[in-house]
Image: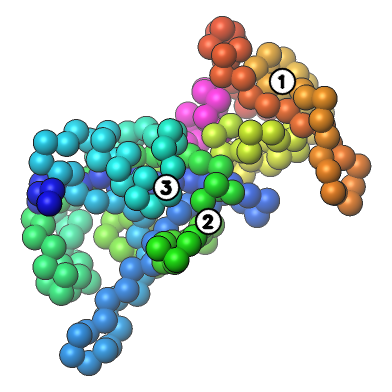
Amino acid sequence: MNKIIPNISVDCVVFGFDSSGLKVLLRNRKLECPETGQLLINDHTITGFHVYEGEDLDSAAQRTLFNITGLTGIYLEQFYAFGSVERVNSEKEKCWRSYNNLGISDHVFSVGYLSLVDSTKIKPDQEHADVSWMPVDNLPELGFDHKEIIAKALERLRLKVRLEPIGFELLPEKFTLREMQELYECILGTSFDRRNFRKKIGQMKYVIPLNEKQKGVAHKPAQKYIFSRDVYERTKIEKLDFSI
């Protein structure tokens, strides 16, 4: 059995996107009193776990992500460290620790990781029935300092999405320009002129049109596109800039 490092953990903020907006993957955390059955804690947390002895941070984050998504090769970036002495010392968290006998320190440092994934690839199953996508602009009650961690991750996402093509990680492999525009508008909290947006996309050689259109839609089918990482690496001197 792997032995945890009691005062070092990783927390992964997993973002997804669909037609209703930007989402974050959360786990419902419940604690019942074993004697009375009273519900003591009922909130949500991002996915995280302690680092094992002999394990590096990135490996711990990859393990934690795989355990909740079943996926490998997901976009993952370390973005911040959290070390407040109050992280696990509120009355609620003291209750959680005492009932679960987790063997962790009362001062836990956590390294935050930002992760991006096509949300259609993650569907709750019997093993992960407590996991669900929640809108980032309407979060439920959160445990620990996870509200702060999500806010920091969103801040990082909004900064980086203007400079690198990480937004494509949130789209399906084949997407429409409308889906792409809606994604960037959602992340950046703004709206773009449709014509100007498409003109800008037309200048990005790594956004490649396909000889393929949507199927089964009520409106006029839109052309589909793909993002080419190879083309981007050859032409990335032409930086992303969505300051329309």
Check contact, mark 3 vs mark 2: CB within 8 A: no
- Label 1, label 3: how many angstroms apart (C-alpha)? 29 Å
- Queried whether the magenta region covers residue 209, the answer comes back as no
* Mark sitting earlier along the chain (2/1): 2
State the extent of the magenta-drawn residues as a range: 156-167
Mark identifier at residue 70: 3
Q: Are marks 2 and 1 in contact (CB under 8 Å)?
A: no
Residue under label 2: 123
Quadrant of the rendering where the C terminus is positioned? top right
Which of the pair 122/194 is nearer the observer? 122
Is disc 2 surrounded by few (<14), some (14 to 19) or many (20+) residues within 10 Å?
few
Query: Residue 234 sits in which quadrant?
Result: top right
Q: Considering depth in this image, is 137 or 211 the residue closer to the camera? A: 211
Q: Residue 174 location in percent, x, y?
A: 69, 33
Question: What amino acid does circle 2 point to?
Answer: Lys
- Residue 208 is marked as 1
Residue 138 in the figure: left or right of residue 59: right
Q: What is the spatial separation of the Cα atoms under label 3 and label 2, in whole angstroms?
A: 10 Å
N-terminal of the pair, mark 1 or mark 3, is: 3
Foreground mark, 1 or 3? 3
Check the image and tell me how it is coloured.
Answer: rainbow
Dot 1 alpha-carbon crowd within 10 angstroms: few under 14, some 14 to 19, many 20 or more = some
Task: Determine which quarter of the picture holds residue 129.
Answer: bottom left
Relative side of 195 to 161, left or right: right
In the image, residue 9 lies at what x, y percent? 20, 46
Amino acid type assigned to the residue bearing label 3 in the image: Gly
The secondary structure making up most of the magenta span is: helix
